[in-house]
C-alpha cells in the first residue's frame, strides 16, 4: 500500500491548518457563506438537508485496518456511529458539525487520509478496479498509475479551477470493473503487438443529465508518456471547455460538440507542443511508487484447499457465500472476497462503527492488513487464504457482514437521494430496500442470477442509473415522487446506456415493476444468458411490452379499487 | 462553483400559511424561525398567515444569514394539522422537518413529538 513521504505528510497537514483557519474565520463572521462555500467544498464539506456532510477520499479504493479503525472512531465521536461508502469508492459522514471538521481532518491526517479532491472543479479522486493486483485477467496493476495521477493532479497549479469536475478511472484488466467508459478520462493498461505495456485512452464519458460513452482518443499510449499526454488533454479541456453554462461544462460535451476526430487532432497538436520529458514522471519515481504496490508475501499453497472443501460440504451457508462472493485470485490457494454491504433491508453502502472495527480486525488478520472499496458500494478482502475462509466467514457473520448476494438483484447501488441530499428530487434508498425485500428469497435471487440495479434520486446520476442493467431514476412529477425505469445499461467494456421502458411510476409500484421486468427476462432468456446478455440480444422491445402490460394491469386494479 | 444545494421550497400554488426554515451555521441542522429567534423544534415554528408577516419573517431570515447565524433561509408553505401545527406541503420540506425516512432514530423525529 502507498505510504506518505514527508512531502505528502506536509502537504496534507498544511491543508488541515489552512482549513482550520478558514473555519475559524467563518465562525467569527469574517467570511460569509458565499465566500466560505468554495473553500469548504475544496475540503469535501457539503451542506445537505439535515446537516453538513463530509466526503473523505479513498484513493483508488484502498484502505488498511488502522484507517478503518480511525473512521470508526470518528463515526462514533463526531457523527452518528456510521459511515456511507459511495459509488466513487469514497466514504461520507452525514452528520458532522462545522466546528468539529478541522479536528476530524487532523485525525484523518494521522492515518494518511484527507478530503482533498472530493469536491469542486478539480481532478477528483482517481478510481480503479477493486481487484487490482489480484485479477488473473490483468496486464498490470492499475494502482501505481492511479497513485501517479493522484500526485500529479493534487498539486497541479494549472488544473485547480477547471470548467467543471473531472473524474479519472484506471483499469489494468480485460474485464472492466472500474467503469472507465463513463468517466471523463478512462485508462486501460494493455499490451501492443510488440508486447510493450501502455494505455488505451478514453475521453468524454460521463453520466449526469447528458450521459455519454467515452471515445477512444488514443489506441495505444506508451506507458512512460502518460502524464504529458494527460496534460495535453487537460489543456485542451481547460482552454476550450465551456465555462458559460455549468450543464455543458464537462469534457464529454466538449468532445461531443467538437467531434471525436477534431478533438483527437487538437489533443495531438497540444501534445506535440509539450516537452514530454519535463512532464512525465522520471523512471525512478514510477518505480518508487510501484514498489509500494508489490504483491504481499504469499505462502506457496496448493490451489485446492481441503479444509475449505470439507467445511463447505457440511455448511451450506458457507458454501453459498463462497460460491457467490469469491473472486479467483492469481495466487494459488488464495481468493478475493466481496463483502456486500447489502444485507436485505440495510442501507446500501452503510457500515456501523462496530462493523468497521470487526472488519478491520478481519482484514488485519486474514488479508495482509488491506481491503478495498468497490464502486458498487461493497468492500473486498483482496488476499484471503482458502484455508482461512471458514474462519473469515464466521467472523463476518458475527459482524452482520456475510450477505451472500454480491452481484445479484439485491446487491443494489443507490445514491443517498432525498433522505439526505439537498439536490434530490426523490428518495432512492427506500426504493432499494423495498426491491431487496421483494427479492429476499435466496433461491429466487440465485435463479435470476447477476443483475445490477442502480438507483439515483435525481438526474445527476450519482447512483449510475444510466449504466444499470435495470436503472431507476427518481424525479418529481406533479408534487409527487415518480420513478423512470430503464434496461440495458452496462458499465463494463460493453458500455451502454439504458433505454426507458415507458412512463414514470409511483414508488409503491417499483418493486412489482421490477418483478415484471424479471419475468420478461426469464421468459426470453436462452441457455445460461445473464439479464444483460438477454437484453443485448433481444433489445428493449420485449421489456417495453412487458412493462406496458404491467402499467395497464395497475390501472385496471386502481380503477377497481375506486 | 458546483451547486450543492437546491434552496427554496418547490411548492407551486398557494404559498400561505408558511414557516421560515434554514440551516444552522454551526450545526448544519435545520432550524425554524420563532418570534424570539430560531428553534430546532418543528412544532415551535412561527406561522405566517398573511403576506406581511411572511415578508417580515423572510427579511429577518436574510438578516440572520447576513449575521452568519443561519444559511439559506426560505419560506416553506404549510398545511395546519387539527392541533394547529405546521406540516410542510412539499415532501422535501417534510423530510427536513422530520429527518431521514430511513432512520426514524435520527433527526428531529427522534427528538421532538410528531406534528399532530
Ligand atoms: C451532497 C451530495 C452530492 C452532491 C451535491 C452531488 C452532486 C453531483 C452533481 C451536480 C453531479 C452531476 C455532475 C455533472 O453532470 O456535471 C453528480 C454526479 C455524480 N456524482 Fe454526485 N453528488 C452528491 C453525492 C454523491 C454521492 C453520495 C456519490 C456516490 C454514491 C456521488 C457520485 C457521483 C457520480 C458517480 C456522478 C456521475 C458521474 C459523473 O460525474 O458524470 N455523488 N454529483
Ligand atoms: S443523484 Fe442526485 S439525489 Fe442522488 S446523490 Fe446525486 S445529486 Fe443527490
Image (tube, rainbow, N blue to C red):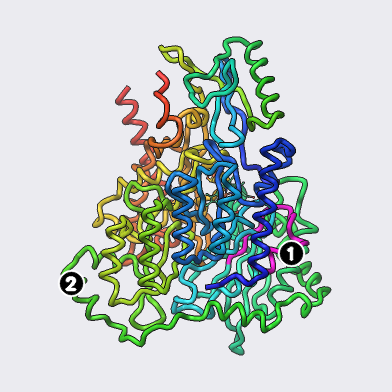
Residues packed near mark 2 inside 10 Å, few (<14), some (14 to 19) or many (20 plus): few
* Label of residue A156 in the image: 1
First to last magenta residue range: A150-169
Specify whether residue A165 is painted magenta: yes
Disc 2 designates what residue? A313
- A324 shown above or below A273: above
- Residue A247 is at least partly visible in this image: no
Residues packed near mark 1 inside 10 Å, few (<14), some (14 to 19) or many (20 plus): few
Percent position (x, y) of residue A71?
A: 48, 56
Specify whether residue A140 is painted magenta: no
Percent position (x, y) of residue A333?
A: 33, 81
- A490 shown above or below B20: below
Residue at 47% in and 47% down: A77
CB within 8 Å, label 2 to label 1:
no
Percent position (x, y) of residue A467?
A: 50, 56
* Marks 2/1: CA–CA distance: 55 Å
Same chain for marks 2 and 1? yes
> Which chain contains the residue that carries disc 1?
A
Q: Nearer the viewer, mark 2 or mark 1?
A: 1
Rendering quarter of residue A37: top right
Identify which residue, A167 or A240, lies in the foreground: A167
Residue at 63% in and 66% down: A9
Q: Is residue B109 left or right of residue B26?
A: left
Rendering quarter of residue A317: bottom left
Mark earlier in primary sequence (2, 1): 1
Q: Is residue B96 left or right of residue A287?
A: left
Residue at 40% in and 39% down: B102
- Residue A88 is at least partly visible in this image: yes
Amino acid at each position: 500500500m502507498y505510504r506518505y513521504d514527508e512531502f505528502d505528510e506536509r502537504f496534507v497537514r498544511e491543508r488541515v491548518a489552512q482549513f482550520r483557519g478558514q473555519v475559524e474565520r467563518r465562525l467569527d463572521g469574517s467570511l460569509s457563506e458565499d465566500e466560505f462555500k468554495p473553500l469548504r467544498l475544496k475540503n469535501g464539506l457539503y451542506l445537505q438537508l439535515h446537516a453538513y456532510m463530509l466526503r473523505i477520499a479513498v484513493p483508488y479504493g484502498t484502505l488498511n485496518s488502522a484507517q478503518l479503525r480511525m473512521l470508526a472512531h470518528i463515526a462514533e465521536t463526531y457523527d452518528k456511529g456510521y459511515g456511507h461508502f459511495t459509488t466513487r469508492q469514497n466514504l461520507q459522514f452525514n452528520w458532522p458539525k462545522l466546528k468539529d471538521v478541522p479536528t476530524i481532518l487532523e485525525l484523518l491526517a494521522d492515518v494518511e487520509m484527507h478530503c482533498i479532491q472530493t469536491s469542486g472543479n478539480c481532478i477528483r479522486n482517481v478510481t480503479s478496479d477493486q481487484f487490482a493486483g489480484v485479477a488473473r485477467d490483468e496486464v498490470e496493476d492499475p494502482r501505481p498509475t492511479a497513485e501517479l495521477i493522484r500526485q500529479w493532479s493534487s498539486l497541479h497549479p494549472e488544473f485547480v479551477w477547471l470548467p467543471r469536475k473531472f473524474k479519472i478511472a484506471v483499469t489494468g484488466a480485460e474485464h472492466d470493473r472500474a467503469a472507465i467508459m463513463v468517466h471523463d478520462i478512462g485508462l486501460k493498461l494493455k499490451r501492443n503487438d510488440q508486447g510493450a505495456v501502455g494505455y488505451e485512452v478514453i475521453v468524454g464519458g460521463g453520466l449526469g443529465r447528458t450521459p455519454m460513452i467515452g471515445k477512444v482518443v488514443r489506441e495505444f499510449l506508451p506507458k512512460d508518456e502518460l502524464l504529458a499526454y494527460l496534460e495535453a488533454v487537460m489543456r485542451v479541456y481547460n482552454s476550450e471547455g465551456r465555462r458559460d453554462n455549468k450543464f455543458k461544462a464537462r469534457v464529454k460535451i466538449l468532445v461531443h460538440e467538437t467531434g471525436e476526430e477534431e478533438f483527437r487532432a487538437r489533443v495531438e497538436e497540444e501534445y506535440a507542443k509539450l516537452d514530454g520529458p519535463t512532464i512525465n514522471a522520471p523512471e525512478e519515481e514510477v518505480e518508487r511508487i510501484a514498489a509500494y504496490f508489490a504483491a504481499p508475501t504469499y505462502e506457496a499453497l496448493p490451489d485446492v484447499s481441503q479444509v475449505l472443501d470439507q467445511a463447505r460440504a457440511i455448511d451450506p451457508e458457507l458454501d453459498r457465500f463462497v460460491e457467490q462472493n469469491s473472486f479467483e485470485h492469481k495466487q494459488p490457494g488464495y481468493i478475493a472476497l466481496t463483502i456486500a454491504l447489502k444485507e436485505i433491508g440495510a442501507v446500501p453502502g452503510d457500515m456501523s462503527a462496530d462493523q468497521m472495527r470487526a472488519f478491520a480486525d478481519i482484514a488485519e488478520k486474514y488479508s495482509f492488513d488491506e481491503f478495498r472499496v468497490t464502486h458498487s458500494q461493497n468492500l473486498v478482502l483482496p488476499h484471503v487464504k482458502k484455508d482461512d475462509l471458514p474462519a473469515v466467514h464466521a467472523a463476518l457473520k458475527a459482524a452482520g457482514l456475510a450477505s451472500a448476494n454480491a452481484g445479484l438483484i439485491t446487491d443494489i447501488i443507490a445514491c443517498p437521494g432525498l433522505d439526505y441530499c439537498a439536490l434530490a428530487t426523490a428518495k432512492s434508498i427506500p426504493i432499494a430496500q423495498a426491491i431487496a425485500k421483494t427479492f429476499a428469497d435466496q433461491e429466487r435471487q440465485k435463479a435470476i442470477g447477476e443483475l445490477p440495479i442502480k438507483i439515483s434520486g435525481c438526474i445527476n446520476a450519482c447512483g449510475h442509473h444510466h449504466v444499470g442493467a435495470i436503472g431507476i431514476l427518481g424525479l418529481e412529477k406533479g408534487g409527487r415522487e415518480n420513478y423512470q425505469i430503464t434496461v440495458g445499461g452496462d458499465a463494463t467494456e460493453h458500455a451502454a446506456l439504458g433505454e426507458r421502458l415507458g412512463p414514470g411510476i409511483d414508488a409503491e409500484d417499483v418493486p412489482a415493476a421490477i418483478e415484471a421486468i424479471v419475468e420478461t427476462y426469464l421468459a426470453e432468456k436462452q441457455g445460461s444468458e445473464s439479464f444483460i446478455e438477454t437484453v443485448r440480444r433481444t433489445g428493449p422491445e420485449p421489456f417495453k411490452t412487458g412493462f406496458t402490460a404491467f402499467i395497464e394491469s395497475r390501472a385496471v386494479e386502481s380503477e377497481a379499487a375506486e | 462553483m458546483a451547486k450543492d444545494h437546491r434552496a427554496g421550497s418547490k411548492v407551486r400554488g398557494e404559498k400561505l400559511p408558511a414557516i421560515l426554515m434554514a440551516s444552522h451555521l454551526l450545526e448544519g441542522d435545520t432550524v425554524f424561525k420563532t418570534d424570539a429567534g430560531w428553534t430546532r423544534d418543528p412544532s415551535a415554528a412561527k406561522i405566517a398567515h398573511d403576506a406581511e408577516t411572511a415578508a417580515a419573517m423572510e427579511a429577518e431570515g436574510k438578516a440572520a444569514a447576513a449575521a452568519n447565524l443561519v444559511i439559506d433561509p426560505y419560506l416553506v408553505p404549510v398545511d395546519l394539522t387539527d392541533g394547529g401545527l405546521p406540516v410542510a406541503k412539499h415532501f422535501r420540506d417534510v423530510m427536513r422537518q422530520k429527518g431521514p425516512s430511513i432512520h426514524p432514530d435520527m433527526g428531529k423525529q427522534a427528538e421532538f413529538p410528531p406534528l399532530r
